[in-house]
Amino acid sequence: GLLRLESQTAPPTDRTRIRFQFAAGRELRFSSSGSQGTVQAVPGSEFNEKGSLQSLGVDPLSDDLTLARFEALAERNARSSIKGFLLNQKAIAGIGNDYADEICFQAGVRPDRRVGQLEPEQLDRLHRYLKRVLRRATLHWSAAHSDPGWLINSRSSGGSCPRCRHALTSLRVTGRKTVLCPRCQRAA
């Protein structure tokens, strides 16, 4: 899902699931294209005690996600697809479908490969680009969501790769639409 701060006068989209209204005509909106997103209202005193929050993995932008910890998480998820690993909220919290595709694209790995098939240098590159893509997304959050042209999956299947101009391909990985460049993201 996606959280956005909007004017109360702006019409909600068909994907808006919940709205929290504030003073001064602003509201926080949660939008989701499907049934993947959830929202929990929790009193502040209970925030750290809730089970679903306790089960969240490491914050991907924190100093806690070192290469060594990333490698250990990857080893525990060796049979998962790379995209499935990145989307696993119990391993690494907060990575969504769009950013998982972009991380794989930037790292030059196919999202449908198994984590256990990655060479050490590919795992290092995946860790590096995970941090880089999410930092960029954080810095340009509003721009990324109003004009997501810098994300690989904002280009549709049949569009062209921003690197090599080859046609992009769309497939399903872990039940999610996945956009990739078959030339830049080879299986081997």
Image (cartoon, rainbow, N blue to C red):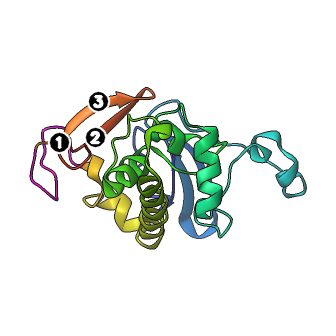
Q: Does the magenta stretch include residue 129?
A: no
Name the residue located 56 percent from the left edge and 38 percent from the top edge.
37
Name the residue located 33 percent from the left edge and 41 percent from the top edge.
110
Magenta stretch: give its range: 155-166
Residue 93 visible, this angle: no
Name the residue located 55 percent from the left edge and 64 percent from the top edge.
26
Q: Is residue 164 magenta?
A: yes
120 or 63, which is in the foreground? 120
Q: What is the number of the mark on residue 179?
A: 2
In the visual, does 45 lie left or right of 98?
right
Q: What is the number of the mark on residue 171?
A: 3
Q: Mark 3 to mark 1: distance in Å?
A: 10 Å
Q: How many labels does the image show?
A: 3
Residue flagged by tag 2: what amino acid is it? Val
Pointer 1: what residue?
168
Judged by its main secondary structure, the magenta piece is: loop
72 or 168, which is in the foreground? 72
Question: Crowding at label 1, few (<14), some or many (≥20) Cα neighbours within 10 Å?
Answer: many
Look at the image and tell me in which quarter the C terminus lies.
Answer: top left
Residue flagged by tag 1: what amino acid is it? Leu
64 or 162, which is in the foreground? 64
Q: Are marks 3 and 1 in contact (CB under 8 Å)?
A: no
- Residue at the bottom extreme of this rendering: 139
Residue 36 spot, x, y in % from top left:
53, 34
Q: Do the residues labelled 2 and 1 touch (CB within 8 Å)?
A: yes
